[in-house]
């Protein structure tokens, strides 16, 4: 709804004009505009075993990368883990960090004790190798943001800060589709159970009936294996899934495009966000030379800019256009990224693929 303001309230100006002035809000203003967030753990929302284990709110975890899938969160996790002042909890403390699939393995959050041990081990290792304790320890699972239970559990950690990755939505959708199709082609375990990963399409749409679904199917609203065009409405999901549990001042938006174009500036923003800006200069050289590459094995099953996919490209662009060019969406992105995200453009694939909004039924 373009009339809703940056944090879910209502604006007096209902203009949908994308050319809005930059709005930078202080942390206090952010929190005041969305003052209904939960300020501390609520024991009524969690099983007793979770809240009674040595105080689950004091796990020693400072931040979480909670979304969105296919926005570069794996590379961000790996780059942060290479910083001498930051550590990422993973399955192997000695190797490349792995993400903690909290939304898929909720059982281990009913007993936080192993996390205390892992945090202690990381701190001890840092002292032995670098001569100092880590200033920030984090976890990463981009599926947290779409799982309300997982978000509540993460939000129960005292003073937790959240990093949310976003990306140009059409490229994000294509990347996620190609990733899932690659997993199917490679015989991933989950892909062997078709019954548990059904393709669910709108009733009015005449689907292909294929598994995996076609690109045309998912663009027209079919849902499969986490692929859902509604999940591209990042601003709406942040308002409904994040703000009820964590105040806006403890949320930082990081874009895939920003990390690629200006990594130094983005990582400086992250250090400032963590409150460890004084260590940035000693870490900056690592940022410039260390760029782990993730998901190199993903094959390109579909390219939305191929001539044969012109119809699907325009269909998806029309679906996204009104939401992503709403004034409230632009203001949300700018505020949560400290101004790093100044605009949101959907991929046009060049002049011949420029979307005519009149064809979308928009004036």
Image (cartoon, rainbow, N blue to C red):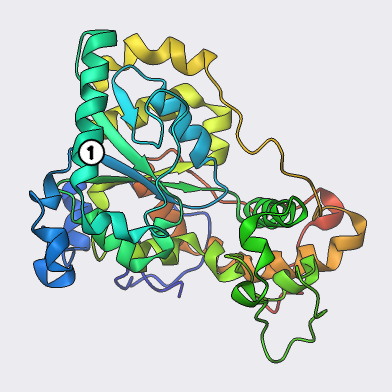
Mark 1, residues whose alpha carbon is within 10 Å: few (<14), some, or many (≥20)? Answer: many
Q: Quadrant of the C terminus?
A: bottom right
Tell me the element at label 1. Answer: loop
**Of residues 331 and 38, the one drawn nearer to the viewer in this rendering:** 38
**Of residues 81 and 32, the one drawn nearer to the viewer in this rendering:** 81
> Residue 352's image quarter?
bottom right
Q: Is the residue 222 above or below the residue 50 in the image?
A: below
Residue sticking out furthest to the bottom: 204
Is 225 on the left-hand or right-hand side of 113? right
Residue lying at 72% horizontally and 53% vertically, measured from the top left:
178
Q: Is residue 22 visible?
A: no
Q: Is the residue 105 above or below the residue 64 in the image?
A: below
Q: Is residue 175 visible?
A: yes
**Of residues 191 and 262, the one drawn nearer to the viewer in this rendering:** 191
Image coordinates for residue 346, horizontal then vertical, percent: 65, 54
Image coordinates for residue 10, horizontal then vertical, percent: 32, 73
Residue lying at 40% horizontally and 55% vertically, measured from the top left:
331
Name the residue beneath numbered marker 1: 62
Image coordinates for residue 193, horizontal then vertical, percent: 65, 69
Is 126 on the left-hand or right-hand side of 50? right
Is 200 on the left-hand or right-hand side of 98? right
Image coordinates for residue 11, horizontal then vertical, percent: 33, 70
Residue lying at 18% horizontally and 46% vertically, measured from the top left:
113
Q: Is the residue 240 above or below the residue 351 in the image?
A: below
Residue lying at 74% horizontally and 70% vertically, measured from the top left:
315
């Amino acid at each position: 709804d373009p009339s809703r303001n940056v944090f879910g309230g209502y604006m007096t100006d209902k203009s949908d004009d994308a050319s809005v002035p930059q709005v930078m809000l202080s942390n206090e203003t952010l929190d005041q505009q969305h003052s209904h967030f939960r300020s501390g753990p609520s024991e009524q929302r969690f099983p007793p075993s979770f809240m009674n284990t040595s105080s689950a709110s004091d796990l020693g975890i400072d931040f979480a990368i909670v979304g969105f899938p296919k926005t570069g969160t794996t590379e961000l996790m790996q780059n942060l883990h290479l910083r001498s002042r930051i550590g990422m909890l993973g399955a192997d403390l000695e190797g490349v960090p792995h993400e903690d699939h909290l939304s898929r393995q909720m059982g281990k959050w009913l007993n936080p004790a192993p996390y205390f041990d892992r945090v202690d081990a990381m701190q001890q290792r840092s002292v032995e190798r670098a001569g100092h304790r880590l200033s920030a320890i984090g976890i990463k699972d981009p599926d947290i943001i779409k799982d309300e239970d997982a978000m509540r559990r993460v939000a129960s950690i005292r003073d937790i800060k959240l990093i949310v990755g976003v990306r140009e939505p059409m490229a994000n959708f294509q990347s996620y589709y190609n990733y899932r199709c690659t997993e199917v082609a490679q015989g991933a375990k989950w892909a062997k159970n078709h019954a548990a990963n059904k393709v669910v399409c709108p009733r009015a749409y005449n689907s292909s009936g294929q598994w995996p679904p076609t690109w045309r199917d998912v663009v027209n609203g079919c849902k499969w294996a986490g692929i859902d065009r509604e999940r591209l409405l990042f601003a709406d999901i942040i308002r409904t899934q994040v703000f009820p549990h964590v105040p806006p001042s403890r949320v930082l938006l990081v874009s895939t495009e920003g990390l690629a174009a200006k990594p130094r500036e983005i990582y400086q923003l992250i250090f400032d966000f963590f409150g460890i800006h004084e260590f940035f200069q000693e870490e900056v050289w690592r940022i410039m030379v260390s760029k782990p590459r993730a998901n190199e094995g993903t094959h390109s099953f579909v390219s939305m800019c191929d001539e044969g996919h012109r119809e699907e490209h325009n269909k998806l662009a029309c679906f996204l256009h009104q939401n992503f060019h709403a004034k409230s969406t632009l203001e949300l992105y700018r505020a949560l990224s400290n101004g790093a995200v100044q605009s949101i453009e959907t991929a046009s694939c060049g002049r011949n693929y420029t979307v005519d909004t009149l064809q979308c039924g928009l004036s």
